[in-house]
Amino acid sequence: MRLGIGEPVLKFVAHSATVLRIASAHGWHAGARYTNLRDIRNFERVGFLDIDWKNYNFEKHIQAVILTKPFMTVAQDVEDKIELTKIIDQAYLLLEHCKFVIIVPKDPLLQNVLTAGIPSEFILGYSVPTRYGGTRIPPSAFRRPVHLLGGRPDIQRRLADQMPVVSIDVNRFTLDAAFGDYFDGSGFRPHPVGGYQTCLTASVSNINAIWNEYRSSIESYTKYISQT
């Protein structure tokens, strides 16, 4: 598994065993939320360990990280600038047990300090805006390796033209598949055949297609390339 500027974008999904099986067959990496590790038991490596951002509990999070040793996890969202130091300290503790930690700056007051205020050991996270919320900092402020969290796959891809994206997690397509819809490369529409697994497979394949030619490029950040 490689992560870095100039590398293909890594794709993660945290969902049911069925979704993980289909996604992994298409080159994706298995993810889970730290509150539910059941569906990753049959995977040798956890790619992405997500958090319960509404009810975050650092102790439960780090216990799950120690147990699973994921490739990547995400620290608590930085909703208020005054919490940044505490969250960075927690991120360093998480980093002792995984390869990469994402820090998600959401407070607009952090816009001008993303590079200087967040140590270079960490990947920046951008929460793709949805009706449930998202990052309020302009995409143009993210000038170092970025992980995109959630949102629609077409919006994720458009954001990558404004910032150097190295990885994404997405499960929106699983919701649409339950209603017979799939992602066709530009949006969601009814699948001509239908069926939950058929829709999942088509969506994953088309998400891969829109990222096939994408490579982020910031020469000064080639140090982020890593191989395990």
Image (cartoon, rainbow, N blue to C red):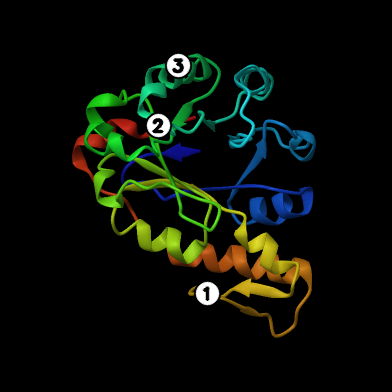
x then y, percent, for residue 1: 50, 38
Q: Which residue is mark 1?
A: 187
Kindly state the secondary structure of the residue where label 3 is placed.
helix
Q: Secondary structure at mark 1?
A: loop
Question: Of the residues shown, which amino acid type is indicated by label 3?
Answer: Tyr
Q: Residue at x 46, y 28 (%)?
A: 100
Decide: few, some or many residues near mark 2? Use Cα within 10 Å; few <14, some 14-19, many ≥20: some
Amino acid found under the numbered disc labelled 2: Ser
Residue 213 visible in image: no
Q: Which residue is mark 2?
A: 226
Mark 3 crowdedness (10 Å alpha carbons): few <14, some 14-19, many ≥20: some
Residue 31 spot, x, y in % from top left? 64, 41
Q: Amino acid at mark 1?
A: Gly
Location of residue 136 in the rendering, given as x and y in whole percent from the top left corner: 37, 48
Q: CA distance from mark 2 to mark 1?
A: 33 Å
What residue is disc 3 on? 92
Quadrant in the rendering for residue 54: top right
12 versus 97 height, above or below: below
- Of residues 174 and 201, the one nearer the viewer is 174
Q: Earlier in the sequence, mark 2 or mark 3?
A: 3
Of mark 2 and mark 1, the one earlier in the sequence is: 1
In the displayed structure, 171 sits above or below 67; it is below
Q: Which residue lies at the image location 73% right of the left edge and 71% below the top edge?
A: 198
Distance (Cα) linking label 2 and label 3: 18 Å
Residue most extreme to the bottom:
192
